[in-house]
Image: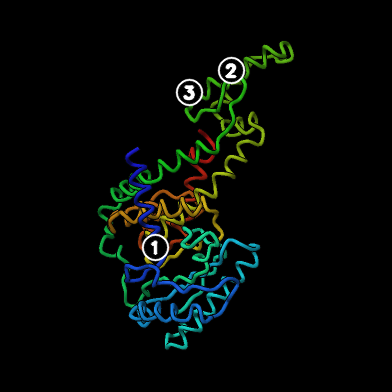
Amino acid sequence: MKTYMRITIGLTFFLSMSIVQAQNNDSTNDRFPFEYNKRSKTVEVSSIWEEAYNNLYEDLMNTNYIIILHSYSSATGKEAYNLKLSKDRGNAIKKFLVNKGVDASRIKIQPHGEPNIENYGDDDYAGDRNVLPEFKRKMTETSQDYIDEFKNKETLDDDIEDGHKIFLNIVDSYVTYIKDRYHLQELPGPGRPSKDVNKFLKQTKEVFDDAKGAYGDAITGDYKNLAEVVGKYGAASFIDLFTSLQAGKVAKDRKPLYDVIGEAFATECFTDYNANIDDYTIGQKFLFYSVKYRVSGLSNFEKYKVRVRFIAGKTYTLSTFPRSDRFERSMDDYSMFMANIRHYFAKSDTRYKD
């Protein structure tokens, strides 16, 4: 319980800090509000825009930063209209800043429509009609990946093993939650198919015993030997057969959440990777930020070990490149990193077994 409390408290802090990366304690001065159903500056908000601009001046003019304008609308109105409205509001603030001298190439617009953040205003959701700037430092051509100082062939085996332990230590609680939420229904007789080989073999025999009792002479031959063969060599197919479409549905329900976990790891383990979470559900966003917060607490050395685990360690893809080649050439390949995390979940007990 204490662990979950720390995660919850930390996540709340992380979310509150990541909405706007500005350098002022008064967050009300770090955003650009709009009047109801308006997409341009009005007399009512003009002075507030100027105040926000002055408050954020140093970051707005710092050419080392990329400016991301997160634009929102209130919860009233249709979703498609709100998304278009928030995009227009982002463009209005971009135009405002460019007229102030900010380089347009540094500004990106991220429309969200209705916000998934705490409402700032009164019952009419006035506080939701905002554009919130986020500042991200540019990657320079001369900057080095932090892993360069940790790469060491001599310790590769130990680093891969450590990376696997670090990864499991973070994801185990989330995997448990996902498995509890989406799981195979219990079958008559043996219950849920077990991932334990010996228990599963026993379940297999129970199913054949039930079938023998139900159909009698219709099942002939040494059915116990048949059950043992099925249990040993046809486990996955057997589970699918006796759970109908359940296994496929469970795997399909779990997969998007495992993909979110992979995205969160990639965002923190690669300095130049930014996940696109716009299409995530509220639950997926909560999972993303929760995992991201946990990974952000790792040292760079620990993040390196996680990277080397899923790039130079055991792979689950069809890659034919040897481990040494992947270690030398692909440590900056976040697509390979995420692919192997996805395949890890797809091939392990987390796919649909309980």
Q: Amino acid at mark 1?
A: Ser
Residues 224 and 91: in front is 91
Residue 12 x, y percent position in the rendering: 38, 53
Residue count near mark 1 (Cα–Cα under 10 Å), binned few <14, some 14–19, many ≥20: few
Could you tell me residue 266's position as x and y percent?
A: 42, 58
The answer to whether 236 appears left or right of 57 in the picture is right
Residue under pointer 1 = 18
Could you give the CA–CA distance between mark 1 and mark 2, rounded to whole angstroms?
Answer: 54 Å
Mark 1 or mark 2, which has the lower sequence index?
A: 1
Q: Position of residue 350 (x, y in %)?
A: 49, 40
Residue at 53% in and 75% down:
90
Residue nearest the viewer, comparing 76 with 103: 76
Q: CA distance from mark 3 to mark 2?
A: 13 Å
Residue 308 seen by the camera: no
Please tell me whether mark 1 or mark 2 is closer to you in this view.
1
Task: Name the residue that disc number 3 marks.
Answer: 198
What residue sits 40% from the left and 58% below the top? 15
Disc number for residue 206: 2
The amino acid type found where label 3 is placed reads: Asn
- The foreground one among 31 and 298 is 31
At a point 47% along the width and 46% down the height, the residue shown is 344
